Image (cartoon, rainbow, N blue to C red):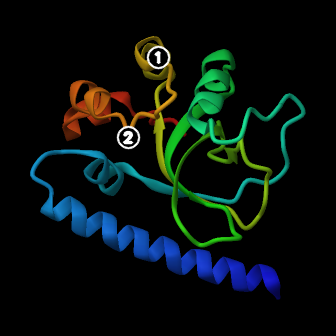
Amino acid sequence: MENIVHRSKAEMALKLLLDDLRESAANARVFGPVSALTLCGRRFPPAMDDPSWLERGPKRHCFANAAKLASERDDVFYAEGYAFNGKIPIPMQHAWLVDRNGCPIDPTWEQSPDHIYFGIVFRKAFITEMMKINGCEDGLLVYPDVLRRHFGSPDLLEAVIEPSV
């Protein structure tokens, strides 16, 4: 019963987040993170079992944890957006990995069926380039200079999104 309660709170929080993103995107003067997430963001199923190779990185370093593993491995992609941890239905800016089947792998948080992920999967070459520029410590959607320069329009964004996942 507890998981159902958490899931419904998180589902309601996701709906509120999406409503807020749509409203903010409609009122935005320039193409930014909310526009990008509204246009190309998608929901991912809860993460299940950890792959045997996964070693979690430090807490509060989700962007670097995900970017590092995505650049080292051929079987996962970097995703960024918002996640809900299931305990507190508050959206947090977060980064995680996505496997070739579109399933999330979280290199920072312990896996839970109560987690909800909503975000964008980026091309591997783009993540490698961004790691050279900012180390992905701050993430992509929250780093204004990177956002405007590299995917500050729908066309530029489409060029850096991974379409196969």
Q: Amino acid at mark 2?
A: Val
Residue located farthest toward the left when viewing the structure as drawn: 29
Horizontally, is 9 left or right of 139 in the view?
Answer: right
Task: Please state which of the two labelled residues, at mark 2 or mark 1, is closer to the viewer.
Answer: 2
Disc tally is: 2
| Number of other residues with Cα within 10 Å of mark 2, as a class: few under 14, some 14 to 19, many 20 or more | some
The amino acid type found where label 1 is placed reads Ala
Residue annotated with mark 2: 142
Task: Give x and y (percent) for residue 163.
Answer: 45, 36
* Residue that badge 1 annotates: 125
Residue at image location 23% in from the left, 69% down from the top: 23
Q: Is residue 97 above or below residue 81?
A: above
Quarter of the view holding residue 143 = top left
Does residue 153 sit above or below 86 in this rendering?
above
Q: Which residue is rendered at x = 53% and y = 40% of the image?
A: 79
Q: Position of residue 132 (x, y in %)?
A: 46, 11
Are there few (<14), some (14-19), or many (20+) residues within 10 Å of tag 1?
few
Q: Horizontally, is 72 left or right of 27 in the view?
A: right
Q: Secondary structure at mark 2?
A: loop
The Cα–Cα distance between marks 2 and 1, rounded to whole angstroms, is: 19 Å
Give the quarter of the figure containing the N terminus.
Answer: bottom right
